[in-house]
Every structure is written in C-alpha cells, then in structure tokens.
C-alpha cells in the first residue's frame, strides 16, 4: 500500500479531534476495571457522580449536567433503579417531571468509589496540578465550541 500525498492538515495524527477521541477511549478503558468492582458502566458512574453531588434532582437536570438529552439518560437511570441504587418518581403535580433519589445502597456506593480519582491520577502518570491545568484547558475548549462556527 502506498502512502497518499495528503496534505498535513488532513493527517489523522495531526487532528485535535482524534487526540481527544482516542484519549477519551483510553480514559474509559482505564476506568473499566475500577467501575467493574462497583458494577457500574462509565455512563452510570457519571450519573452517580451527579447524584452524589445533588441528590433529589430531576431527569432533565441530570441530563443537562451530563450534556446529553433526557431520552438517552433514561435507560441508564432505569438500570440504576433496577440495581437498587436510585428511585425514580413522577411528580404528582406534573407527571412529565421525574425526580431521582439515591437509595441507601446508592449512597453507600459513594464510599467504595472514593478511591477511583486517585487511581486515575496514578494511571495518568502526571501531577495533580498538570491534570487540573489540562482540565481547565479542556473546559475552555468545550465552552468555546458551544459558539457556532
């Protein structure tokens, strides 16, 4: 197979999007064995992080925090409910609104999860300050990308 004479702007390894995508894949892969011990998937873990921070929120609130639509977060919330980690209750005054509350089991899982951030820092082989700077830059990039081109 011969190498194409593609311009450098179109080389895969020169793409910021691929660097972000492939790093995200590696990050998820790093989390996988840690979350397996908690019987959580990565998206479920993200939902639990929000609930440990803000118990008693609505489905629409958690979907906003996770930057997703309510329809895509509902199946994972149903699974968390089936696993006994949270309850979902429709509001009597407006049945379109669903409130989420952690169960005792869901609250207890937080203690088991406390070691995960340190494991991720260790796996990254970077200092906490370097990781916080990277996070700051990524959040700035994310905010800038909200503005249409």
Image (tube, rainbow, N blue to C red):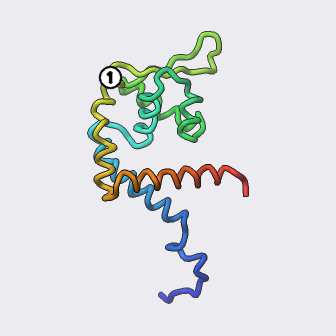
Relative placement, left or right, of 145 versus 137 is: right
Crowding at dot 1, Cα within 10 Å, few <14 / some 14-19 / many 20+, comes out as: few
Viewer-nearest residue: 99 or 51: 51
Q: Residue 133, how many percent across, how many down? A: 46, 54
Which residue is farthest front? 129
Q: Picture quarter containing residue 51?
A: top left
Q: Residue at x 42, y 31 (%)?
A: 79
Above or below for 64 versus 101: below
Is 142 placed left or right of 103 in the picture? right
Residue displayed at 66% across by 49% down: 146
x 33%, y 30%: residue: 110
Residue 93 placement (x, y as % from top left):
64, 10
State the residue in front, 44 or 126. 126
Residue at x 42% of width, y 32% of height: 48
- Residue that carries the numbered disc 1 in the rendered image: 105
SS class, disc 1: helix
Instruction: Give x and y (percent) for residue 95.
Output: 62, 16
């Amino acid at each position: 197979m011969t190498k194409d004479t593609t311009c450098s702007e179109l080389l895969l390894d020169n793409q910021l999007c691929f660097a972000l995508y492939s790093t995200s894949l590696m990050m998820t892969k790093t989390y996988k064995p840690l979350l397996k011990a908690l019987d959580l998937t990565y998206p479920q873990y993200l939902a639990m992080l929000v609930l440990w921070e803000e118990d008693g929120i609505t489905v629409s609130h958690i979907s906003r925090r996770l930057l997703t639509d309510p329809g895509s977060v509902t199946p994972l919330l149903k699974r968390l409910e089936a696993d006994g980690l949270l309850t979902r209750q429709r509001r009597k005054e407006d049945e379109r609104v669903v409130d989420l509350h952690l169960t005792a089991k869901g609250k207890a899982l937080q203690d088991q999860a406390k070691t995960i951030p340190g494991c991720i820092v260790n796996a990254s082989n970077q200092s906490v300050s370097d990781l916080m700077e990277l996070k700051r830059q990524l959040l700035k990039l994310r905010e800038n990308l909200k503005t249409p081109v």
